[in-house]
Structure formats: structure tokens, C-alpha cells
Image (cartoon, grey):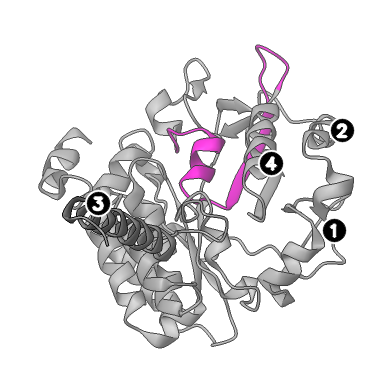
């Protein structure tokens, strides 16, 4: 017969065992991944949240405009640097923010002889850095798929890109292994088929010099000089025009919006950064309208952004459309993780008047 002390010790031992089992069950039930790890990042690994049966063309993708125009060196006597900068984050930064499609305009830096990204008469980052960032990212984030539009920029009279040098630089990305050629129609492929292909990139460029052209890459289609260019105050008209493009599109079309604006005839007076800040109110309104309209949501396949890494809101709102499209696994969790990085208001909307004065 147990003594009072023995019964007490046995009771305590049982209590410890019960608590341990309960704790183990709690941990098991709150496991965030199949292998016990955390859930995939909602920005850097957002494609992993998309089921295999979803069509690639039905996704909403963040894109960047003049993707490599960071810390642009402006040719002497031409436009100031601030007018030519369209991004402030590296290509790797942009990928970590969720960008999956890039606008790369190539020229030769007359100072170094290197192929660089170009905006007008300015020199951005070297193409080899662009591709090195992409190679690093895709090695770290399996299943994330990238498209790019590579152009030999012909508006710079001082230096032109040589196609053979661009082709040589492609080798950083192992094109024979990882590029989709024109035998792949990515707009007819599911995400599962893209993953099964083992390919990481699709490139749109001039067939006269590029060996890996894929004409099925979709790039922004709403740029219109009448609306995207001009005075700072034209933002509302520009965003109304983009909305009209979506509303009037055939249901089988897929539209990627050109959010970027330029000063046009008053070039040099307003910077892309000022446009981005001034237009933020219209951007948020447009994303809300798209999310609540079945037709606009279906045809909207993403948007091209200036200063995509200024905050998480721009890329996040474009990715958020995938939740409204119903193409995301565990949408409630994904949306929560996505919005945790938002900081609303993301920019000082009251500062729009100040931005206008600065211009």
C-alpha cells in the first residue's frame, strides 16, 4: 500500500506526463510547414502558395519598369540623376518583394565598356549584376518563375548595346538548362507544368539576335502618352484610363497595367519618385476597384511599378489580387502574412501638395 508521500509523487509524475503530451500536441497542431518549418514567405516565395492546377496567365504579378535603373549615372549635360532613377532596390531586393517580371533596357556604359541597364541617356546597374541576382534568388527559392523583356536600347545616341555581349552575359543564368524557348506557351501552362519543366526563366527579346525568345511573355499594355505622360496632377486621369482598359477588355484578354508615369513634354521637372508618391491614393483606389469587380479581376494579370521596394504596399496590393482571384492556398493565412508588412498610410498622402510644390 502506497504511503501518502508515494501517492503524491505518483500524482505529480502523471501530471508532468499529461502536460508534456498536451504541449507536444499543441506544437504539432501549430506546425507551420510539412517539414516542421515556417510557412513560405508571402513575398519572396509567393508562387509556392499557388496550387499546381492554377493557370500562370491567371496570376497577378508585380513587375518593375526600368528595372535596373538604380543610382543612375546621368550623362553630363543631360537630365539630372533623379529623373532617370526608377527603382531604389537591387534586382535581388525586387525579387524578395515579389517582383517576377523585369523590364531591362540595355546600352554600353561609355566609361567602363560594360553592358548596363539604361533609362534615356543614363546608365544604371551592369547586366551581369542583374543576372547574378536572379541566379542567386532562383537557387535559394525553388519554383519561383521569372520573365523578362530584354531590349537593346536605341534611344541613347552615345552608346549602344552589342547583342553578342548580351548573349554572353545570358550564360550566367544557364540558358540551355533554365530558359524556356518559343516551344513553351506559358499562357497555356499551369503552375504545376511550369514547375515540372524545371525552367526558371522566360525571355522576350528580338529574334534577330536572341536564341531563347519566348513570345508568350505578357508585359504591360496600358501605357498611353496622353495619360501616362504630363503634369503631376494628371494622375487621376491616368488611373481612370487604366480602369477603362480593364473594364473594356475581352474576358479572354490579360492586361498588365502600366502604373508608371513620365513628365513627357516637361521632362526634368518631375521625378518618377514624385509621381509614385503623388499617385498613391489613386493606386490604392484602383486596387480596391479591381478586387471588387469580377471582370476587372479576371483580366488583370498584374502591374508594372516604379520604386517597387519603397514599401511592401505596392507589391503587396498586386499580390493581394491573387487572394481575391481565389488562386491561393490557405488564403486567410496568406493574406494575414501579406498584410503584416503593410504600413498604412504607406506614404504621407497629405504630402501630395508638398510633392507638387517640389516639382
> Gap between marks 2 and 3, in whole Å?
81 Å
Q: Is residue 188 magenta?
A: no
Q: Does any portion of residue 210 appear in the rendered image?
A: no
Residue 350, given in percent of the width and then of the height, sits at 10, 48
Q: Earlier in the sequence, mark 1 or mark 2?
A: 2
Instruction: Single out the mark in the foreground, 1 or 2.
Output: 1
Q: Which residue is mark 4?
A: 139
Q: Position of residue 183 (x, y in %)?
A: 87, 66
Number of numbered callouts drawn: 4
- The answer to which quarter of the image holds residue 181 is bottom right
**Magenta segment range?**
86-114
Residue at image location 81% in from the left, 62% down from the top: 197
Locate residue 318: give its quadrant. Answer: bottom left
Badge 4: residue crowd in 10 Å (few <14, some 14–19, many ≥20):
few
At mark 1, the secondary structure is loop
Question: Against 79, is 112 above or below?
Answer: above
Q: Residue at x 45, y 59 (%)?
A: 32
CA–CA distance in space, label 1 to label 2: 18 Å
Name the N-terminal-most of marks 2 and 3.
Answer: 3
Q: Nearer the viewer, mark 2 or mark 3?
A: 3
Residue furthest front as drawn: 1
Amino acid at each position: 500500500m502506497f504511503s501518502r508521500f508515494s501517492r503524491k509523487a505518483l500524482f505529480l509524475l502523471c501530471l508532468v506526463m499529461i502536460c508534456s503530451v498536451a504541449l507536444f500536441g499543441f506544437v504539432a497542431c501549430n506546425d507551420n510547414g510539412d517539414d516542421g518549418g515556417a510557412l513560405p514567405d508571402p513575398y519572396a516565395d509567393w508562387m509556392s502558395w499557388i496550387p499546381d492546377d492554377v493557370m500562370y496567365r491567371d496570376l497577378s504579378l508585380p513587375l518593375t519598369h526600368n528595372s535596373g535603373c538604380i543610382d543612375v549615372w546621368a550623362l553630363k549635360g543631360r537630365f539630372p540623376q533623379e529623373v532617370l532613377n526608377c527603382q531604389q532596390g537591387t534586382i535581388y531586393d525586387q525579387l524578395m518583394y515579389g517582383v517576377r517580371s523585369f523590364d531591362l533596357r540595355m546600352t554600353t556604359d561609355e566609361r567602363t565598356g560594360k553592358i548596363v541597364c539604361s533609362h534615356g541617356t543614363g546608365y544604371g546597374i551592369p547586366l551581369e549584376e542583374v543576372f547574378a541576382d536572379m541566379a542567386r534568388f532562383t537557387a535559394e527559392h525553388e519554383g519561383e518563375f521569372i520573365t523578362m523583356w530584354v531590349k537593346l536600347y536605341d534611344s541613347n545616341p552615345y552608346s549602344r548595346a552589342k547583342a553578342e555581349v548580351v548573349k554572353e552575359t545570358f550564360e550566367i543564368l544557364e540558358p540551355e538548362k533554365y530558359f524556356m524557348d518559343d516551344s513553351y506557351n506559358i499562357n497555356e501552362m499551369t503552375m504545376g507544368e511550369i514547375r515540372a519543366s524545371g525552367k526558371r526563366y522566360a525571355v522576350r527579346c528580338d529574334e534577330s539576335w536572341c536564341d531563347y525568345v519566348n513570345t508568350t511573355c505578357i508585359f504591360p499594355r496600358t501605357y498611353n502618352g496622353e495619360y501616362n505622360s504630363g503634369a503631376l496632377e494628371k494622375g487621376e486621369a491616368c488611373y481612370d484610363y487604366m480602369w477603362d482598359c480593364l473594364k473594356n477588355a475581352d474576358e479572354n484578354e490579360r492586361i498588365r497595367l502600366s502604373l508608371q508615369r513620365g513628365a513627357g513634354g516637361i521632362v526634368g521637372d518631375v521625378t518618377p519618385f514624385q509621381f509614385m508618391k503623388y499617385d498613391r491614393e489613386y493606386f490604392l483606389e484602383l486596387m480596391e476597384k479591381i478586387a471588387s469587380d469580377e471582370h476587372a479581376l479576371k483580366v488583370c494579370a498584374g502591374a508594372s511599378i516604379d520604386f517597387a521596394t519603397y514599401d511592401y504596399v505596392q507589391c503587396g496590393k498586386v499580390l493581394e489580387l491573387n487572394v481575391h482571384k481565389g488562386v491561393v492556398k490557405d488564403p486567410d493565412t496568406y493574406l494575414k502574412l501579406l498584410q503584416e508588412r503593410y504600413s498604412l498610410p504607406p506614404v504621407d498622402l497629405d504630402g501630395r501638395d508638398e510633392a507638387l510644390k517640389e516639382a
